[in-house]
Structure formats: structure tokens, C-alpha cells
Image (cartoon, rainbow, N blue to C red):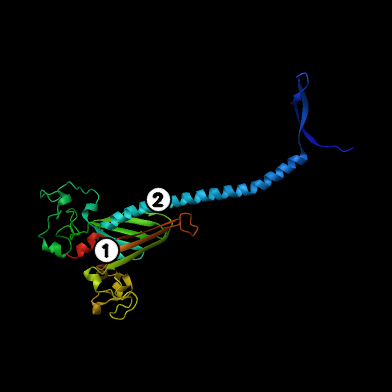
Amino acid sequence: MTHKIVIWFKQRMPLAKDFLGQTMWHNCAGFTVTNMMVVSIILGILAIPVARYLTRALQGITTETRKAKSQDALRNAFAKLETDFMDMNEITISEDQRIEFMMDSYRMPGYRAKGDLDGDGILNEVDADDDNDLTDFTKISAGMGGYDHQDNDDDAIDEGHVDVYCRYRLNANNELIREFNYNEAGYGKAEVLAENIMEFQLTYLGSKNEEYGFAVDLGEDGLPGTGDAGEQDGKITAIEISRVTDANDGHGNGNDVIDTPEERLYIVSIHVHVVQDLNKDGRSDFSLDTELAPPMLTIKRRF
């Protein structure tokens, strides 16, 4: 005699009405073990694509969240960088991953636009000579006097020192750093603008429309009339600035980088390229590029 294993659910289920209108009942059996095995197999088969779908969906959400975080971090960093770069008036360090430049005294902590630093009755924000040393020719010859656009020390507080140095650099921990040095007292605490930077590149460019740049549009060999790559193309690169020497109306030293005060006079704009890899997987999460032409760079060197 064959026995069948059945899991019973002791319920009485309504079947139909008899000819007298009374409900007829019968007992219903539940799933057999075989039924349950079949259902389990089907559910197992369906679970694989569902799990894959959920995994990919979760990975997609995680990736997009990380990219959004990276985008937010770099845009906030660039907001500060662009503000600072547009206030630079003289570059003192011009490396691929480090730049240092001077700024006017209005970028110092405690600067009061509505104040009157020199007591001449003219508010600082409209005073062309905040510290009233326009006639001090000794200071002017040292770059520490005259009108504000040429005066590196116009705060009238710590005489004989540059008011503000600002520096951007990539440190050994791949962090984009911003820092300030006031009155040459030394750089203070570094501000980390962005972490896990995969690429940081500063590219310095001149302009053919400037008196300096016009003479050095000679291509990669730095020589006139050779027709080499870049000659008379209207773009003044760091290579040209460095390779065009005094013999050809330039000021380059031939080492292919801009690293002397004379060479830095040619800089009109700076291209900034930054790539961030937040999770350190070797792939970019977000990147930003910008090119800035600080107006005071060319104004200051003309006077």
C-alpha cells in the first residue's frame, strides 16, 4: 500500500449549495512535500535575476551618490580657487602642482572697506593709495609703496612686508591645499579643499595680444622663421616662454618650465585641471577644468 505524505490544513471550505439551499462543506488538504519542492526551485530560479537586478541597482545608486559628492566637493573647491586666482597680482611660484602669488591688502583678515586706514578722508574701498605713501620713492622702488595696484605693502600695519601670499598645492596625501601667509609671518593652518585627488595640473599661458607674448610666438624650438610646431599660432605656451632667450627678444632660460621672475611676467592666464577619485579605485569620479585670466597680473607689470 502506497502512503502519501501530506501537510494538512484542517479547514472546512464551502463547496456549493444543495437543492435545499444549504451550504455543502468539504475538507481541503494543503501542499504536499513535492509541491513545496517545486515552489522552492521556482523561487530559487527567480531569486538569481532579482538579486542581480537589486545588486546592480544598489551599485548604481552608490556610484551616483559618490559622483555627486565628488562634484559638490570640486565645485566648492573651484569656487574658492577662482575667487583667489582672480585677485592675484603677481606670481612668485609657478610649478605644475604648486602656485604661490601675491594679493592686495583687502584680502587680509580684518580689512574694513568702509574704514579709512590712512586718515585722508577717503574710504579704503575707493582709496587708490590706502597707506598714503605715494610720494615715498624709497618704498616705491622696493615695491612697497605707491598706488595700491603696485604696492605690495599697503596695509600700513606691518611695514616692509608683503601683505598677502596665497598658495595652492597638492600634498603627499593627494589633498588639494589652500593656505595664506599674512605680512610674511609664515603660512598658517592649511585648508584641505578636496581629498583623494587623482590629477592636479596647472598650465601657464601667455598671450600674443600682450607686448611680452607677441615676441615669443616662435614655436617649440624658440627660433624665428623655422616653421616648427606652434610658430605664429597665436598661443603662447610655457615651452615658448622658456625657450625664447634674450637673443630672440625673450627672457627664457631654456629649461622648458617657467621658473624665473622674468619668465613669469609673460603669464596671462592659468589653466587648472583637477580629477578626483573618492573611493581610490583608480577611476575618475568627477573632474573640472577652468582657465582664468587674473586682470591684475598684466596691470601690475605695466607700472
In this view, 73 is above or below 260: above
Q: Residue at x 49, y 51 (%)?
A: 63
Task: Give the labeled residue for mark 2.
Answer: 72
* Left/right of residue 186 with respect to residue 284 in the rendered view: left
Mark 1: give few (<14), some (14-19) or many (20+) Cα within 10 Å: some
In this rendering, is residue 256 above or below 282?
below
Residue at the far bottom: name it: 226
Residue 200 relative to residue 301: left or right? right
Quick one: SS at disc 1? strand
Secondary element at tag 2: helix
Q: The residue under label 2 is which amino acid type? A: Asp
**Residue nearest the observer in this picture, 27 or 268:** 27
Label 2 crowd (10 A; few <14 / some 14-19 / many >=20): some
Query: Which quadrant of the figure contains the N terminus?
Result: top right
Q: Is residue 190 visible?
A: no
Residue drawn at the location 58% of the way across and 49% of the way down: 53
Where residue 52 is drawn, which disc sits there? none
Residue nearest the viewer, comparing 130 with 155: 130
Give the tally of numbered discs. 2
Indicate the amino acid at tag 1: Ile
